[in-house]
Image (tube, helix red, strand yellow):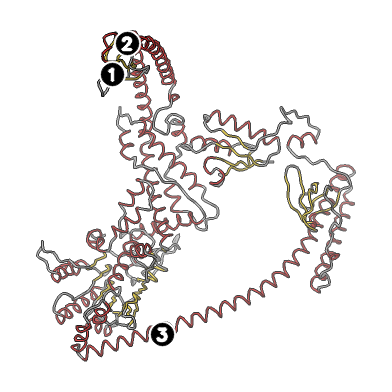
Amino acid sequence: MASDLSHSSARVLEFDALRDLLRGYASSPLGQNRISALAPSADADWIQKQQEFTSEVREFRRVGGRFDFSGLLAIGPLVEKSRIAGAALETTEIRDVVLVVDRAAEWREIALQPPAAMRSEWRRVRIVSQQIIDFTDFMRSFRNKIQPDGTLEDKASPELARIRREIEKQRRAIQESLRGYLRRLADEGTAQEELVTIRGERFVIPVKVEQKRRVQGVVHGASSSGQTVFVEPLETIEQNNELVRLLEEEQIEIHRILLEMTGRIGNQADAILVAVDALAELELQSAKARFAEDYTCVEVQPSGGRQESCRDSCPRLSGRAELGSEPHLLLHNARHPLLERNLKAKGASVVPVSVELEGDRRQLIITGPNTGGKTVTLKTIGLLALMAQAGLPVPADRAELPVFDAVLADIGDYQSIEQNLSTFSAHVTNIDFISRTATAQSLVLLDELGSATDPEEGAALAVAIAEHFRHIGCISVISTHHTSLKVYAANTPSVLNAAVGFDERTLQPTYELKVGVPGASAGINIAQRLGLNAAIVENARTRLGSQARDVGQFLDRLQAELREAGNERLRLQANEEVLAREKARLAAAGKQQQQAKVREMEKKLESVLRDFEYHAREAVNAIQDRVAALKLSKDAERRIAKLRREFREQFDATVVAHSTGADQGDPHAQPQLVKHVSEGDTVKLKSTGRPARVVRKVDDDHFEVQMGAMKMKISRADIAEVLTSVQSVAESPVQAARARGISVSVVNEDANVPTEINVIGHTVDDASREVEKFVDRAFLAGLPQVRVVHGSGMGILRKALRQMLQQHPHVASVTEPPQNEGGGGATVVELRV
């Protein structure tokens, strides 16, 4: 993009302030840095990908998808440092690197298996996420070695664990020696108090200053009051020396471990930097998506004629390759996001702006009263153009924009005493630069054109400047008070007039932009509203020329007629909506009646089909038994033919009865329903072909039954028959095996199997063994679901257990419970029972 886009015009159009607003949606320094670098681009392909990227993340959030980016640091310098031979990162730095890598690996799992409820393809997200490699082996080498506070675990290496045990043992020995020595000194009145403390990594005791010569040893300092000295007795000097030696060994071993860990990071430096860049881009897109939700933004639609076929059916902004066709600018109900934020804080709302420029009509002249919203309209168009080209969705109901090679604005007062520029000369200097820079692919925004000088000369300059940009062919939006520009717009086919509204009754601007008509400046009315002396206002009215007064009155009448036409249009739209709702209500009522009849028919036919399926299944079982025993195939064929004939007769009878209404309200018209079912009965189900025990009667047509460990609600139509004797129902894999005559022995079979296990604080290996045993016992007990509590922490234990469970033969699925049931600190396991 041209340099003026990223500097002067972008600053005037408040793009930096928008970036600050967007930065508030990032929760980590990593994402905030990426947002700070965000800038508009003229690369149409990049813009399209950014718009699609944000839309995919918005869809992910719509279906409930979330990801925690908080705490992610910009670890690039640390990773680069790890490449240096002999360099060692601090434990806190290694912890920060491991946290980012772990979070990247977590996102990779989400990206490879996006939520099933998403309606759109996850193409852009997957492309970025696939750059993150599998860090499982890398993370395993850091598991259980660094505590959350950044200190090394004792188990970071066997040598470190040994040294720390020796240090603890030596400290206890020194403290025991000093306590005994202190007791003796206290009896003599020499000790200040019975306290063992540390000075410079050496254990010492407090001694009264006047008694220090009675204690043989080394003085390591005095208290702030000077009344106490800290003495290391001679008898513990060798013990303290040994402690210092052990502490030095500990530091040497820690340095060796840090060198080793830093080397591992250096070996994966390229992959880690790619993962960091992916996370930064993802947090940028997440911030854009959250911003779009809060400000009701839309993805920018294609503009400029021909649309690429996407893979290519996706929305696309027109780029330079498409600029042979006419660019098209359309903003429907667009809002300035910074103004909207400020008004929201005051409980107010923005009046939206709608603008459309296409074909030969590339110039818009906006007129109307001061404080009416002309400048806000220019800034809204300019800022939304910059947002679109920075890959941001824009706050509007609909947006179609071309890709501009520059956005050039002359808005505000550029007066400068330091540079000897008056208001007028500053405007002229800026417009001169814009006139030499603008091309047919530029957007030019000029505020109060021709002001700050003689009105007649200013008007002539304004028309000439507007004519210059029209000849260039760029899209330009100009605000002014000059009547000459209104006439120029009315007489030039490729230029549109527009007006910001003003209510003559209240003398208040309405801030509405009306395209197609010029507006009155209403300067005298505005002065009256602002409280100018009434005598001055009246004197001004008498001095107003008759022509100017007539033009003003005409424009006022035109605005009033437009308001009335707008109100009439709203009334007609309201009537149309009432008629449409009534039409929809009648259609829905008729559709509901038809659907009710269809559902009733379907229920009857479903009952017939279930009965046929049950008898067919019984017939097949009988056929199989006879084939195995007597090979009587002809008898099997006769039974199938009889069932088919009976089904056809019953089906025809049901259809006829339903179509004629003969079965209406007749309970005996329900085919093949078992009439008498009581609690405690053992029934056979058509849907499963298995027996089940009736636990309770819900109502006349529904029952709750138990089949093994599973309870479910069934309808009377699902009952094939009431069995005369209770059948044994296998309630668990063990009981099922025994029912087949297999001898199975289980330790503590009578003990109740819990449905939850807590492995917080366990190592990965210990936790994996405990959870595997727990799952086996739950499966043998016939439990359908269990819960594993492992805590959140750095997520290492959670990830290892979930990977193990997903490969377990008895596990059907592994899911994360809702936040109110443990969230990421627990895992719900469905078993294959």
Report the mark closest to the observer, 1 or 2. Answer: 1
Question: Pointer 2: what residue?
Answer: 233
Tell me the tag on residue 565: 3
In the image, 467: left or right of 497? Answer: left
Quarter of the image for residue 208 reads top left
Q: Which x, y percent locates residue 469? A: 23, 74
> Identity of the amino acid at label 1?
Thr
Foreground label between 1 and 3: 1
| Of the pair 340 and 215, the residue shown nearer to us | 215
The structure residue drawn at horizontal position 80% and vertical position 69%, both measured from the top left corner, is 655
Residue at figure coordinates x 81%, y 57% from the top left: 611
Q: Quadrant of the N terminus?
A: bottom left
Image height of 322 relative to 546, above or below: above
As drawn, the residue found furthest toward the left would be 420
Q: Is residue 684 left or right of residue 9?
A: right
The disc labelled 3 sits on which kind of residue?
Answer: Ala
**In-image side of 388 versus 811 (left or right):** left
Between the residue at mark 2 and the residue at mark 3, the CA separation in whole angstroms equals 102 Å
**x, y percent for residue 749:** 73, 30
**Sequence-wise, which precedes: disc 2 or disc 3?**
2
**Which residue is drawn at the image coordinates 28% and 61% (left, top)?**
14
Of helix, strand and loop, which one carries label 1? strand
Tell me the SS state at disc 3. Answer: helix
Q: Residue at x 35, y 76 (%)?
A: 512
Q: Is residue 110 in sight in this rendering? A: yes
Give whichever of 281, 457 is nearer the camera.
457
Q: Specify the label residue 228 is tagged with.
A: 1
Vertical order, 426 against 471 (above or below): above
Q: What residue type is labelled 2?
A: Pro
CB-based contact (under 8 Å), mark 2 and mark 3:
no
Label placed on residue 653: none
